[in-house]
Image (tube, grey):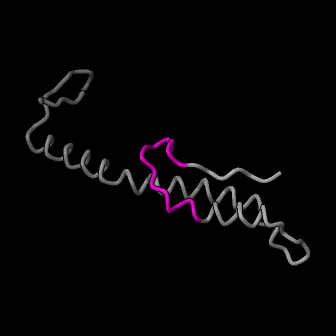
Amino acid sequence: MTMYKMENNIKVKLTSEEETEVKAFQKAWADEAPNRRMKKLRQQRDALLVETDWMGNSDVTMSDAWTTYRQALRDITTQTPSDDALSNITFPTKPS
């Protein structure tokens, strides 16, 4: 497949070296997708844990439901995201 770039609003065919460089970049980006997804999952998990960190204070007694919820959040990274939307990840339900 022929690849092009735009130079001064003119469509120009890439050289073979440029095509090789673009393909290498595209492959590296695709290969890195699982790591980006796990990073996103950890960020979401960490934000949810931060919301409940106050419960770990020495003057607060954490209920079993909250302890279970926090453990489920910590364990969520055992799931593997299948897409960038993390659509297959099941986050635990926050206790009321």
Foreground pick, 8 / 14: 14
Furthest-right residue in view?
Answer: 59
Displayed quadrant of residue 20: top left
In the shown orientation, is residue 39 left or right of residue 10? right
In the shown orientation, is residue 62 left or right of residue 35? right
Please tell me whether residue 16 is drawn above or below residue 33 in the rendered image. Answer: above
Q: Image point 24% across, 48% down: which residue?
A: 27
Quadrant for the N terminus, please. Answer: top left
Please tell me whether residue 60 is drawn above or below residue 52 in the rendered image. Answer: below
Foreground pick, 85 / 6: 85
Q: What range is drawn magenta here?
A: 75-89
Furthest-bottom residue in view?
Answer: 58
Foreground pick, 96 / 38: 96
- Pinpoint residue 51: horizontal percent, then vertical percent: 76, 58
- Pinpoint residue 88: horizontal percent, then vertical percent: 49, 45
In the shown orientation, is residue 16 left or right of residue 44? left
Q: Image point 50% across, 41% down: which residue?
A: 85
**Callout count:** 0
In the shown orientation, is residue 37 left or right of residue 60? left
- Pinpoint residue 63: horizontal percent, then vertical percent: 83, 66
Furthest-left residue in view?
Answer: 16
Please tell me whether residue 80 is drawn above or below residue 19 in the rendered image. Answer: below
Q: Is residue 30 magenta?
A: no
Q: Image point 30% across, 47% down: which residue?
A: 30
* Most frequent secondary structure within the magenta stretch: loop
Furthest-top residue in view?
Answer: 10
Displayed quadrant of residue 15: top left
Please tell me whether residue 55 is drawn above or below residue 7 in the rendered image. Answer: below
